[in-house]
Amino acid sequence: MFHEQVAADLGSVAGLRKRLERWAGSHGIPDTRADDVLIAAQEAMTNAAQHAHPDGEQGTIAVTAEVDGQALTLTIADDGRWRHRPARLGGGVGLALIRATADATIVDSGPQGTTIRLRWDWS
């Protein structure tokens, strides 16, 4: 199992992505699925860093990943606020990209933060 919690800033996200990539590489995840996992993880973590704390508040991002047989479950949680934003040129497509790369996506949002649960199967 992979589990880390970092500050909700882009510098922390970059290091966290590299550690998640190393973990995925050592757990038998097929390369084609690992690419999808890393794309979705990067997008979700970046969204949390950029959008969950719009007023410069300090926050955290927690990432948990687990391989169970022929599947991987990834959870990314922040402690900020969900903000609905219209899609615009050059942005606003993050959640669509996340959903397109995962086999299953659940987004839970509330006053305590947002949690995105993703699953990939390769059986």
Image (cartoon, rainbow, N blue to C red):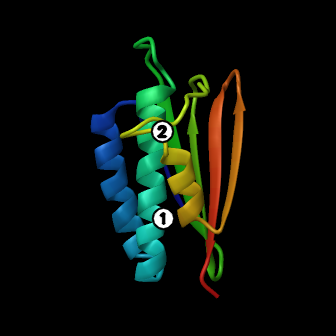
Q: Is residue 49 visible?
A: yes
User: Given contact means CB atoms under 8 Å apart, are the residues at marks 2 and 1 in contact?
Assistant: no
Q: Along the line of sight, which residue is nearer the eye, 117 or 66?
A: 117
Residue type marked 1: Val
Residue at 46% in and 37% down = 47
Residue beneath label 1, please? Answer: 37
> Is residue 22 toward the left or the right of residue 27 in the image?
left
Packing grade of label 2 (10 A; few <14, some 14-19, many >=20) is some
> So how many labels did they put on this image?
2
Q: Which mark is residue 23?
A: none
Q: Position of residue 54 (x, y in %)?
A: 46, 17
Residue at 49% in and 46% down = 94
Asked where in the image residue 109 lies, by quadrant, the reply is top right
Residue type marked 2: Gly
- Quarter of the figure that contains the N terminus: bottom right
Residue beneath label 2, please? Answer: 92
Q: Along the line of sight, which residue is nearer the eye, 98 or 28?
A: 98
Q: Along the line of sight, which residue is nearer the eye, 77 or 26?
A: 77
Query: Residues under labels 2 and 1: Cα distance?
Result: 20 Å
Residue at 42% in and 59% down = 39
For label 2, the SS is: loop
- Quarter of the figure that contains the C terminus: bottom right
Q: Position of residue 16 (x, y in %)?
A: 36, 48
In the image, residue 122 sits, relative to residue 102, either above or below, namely: below
Q: Position of residue 9 (x, y in %)?
A: 35, 30
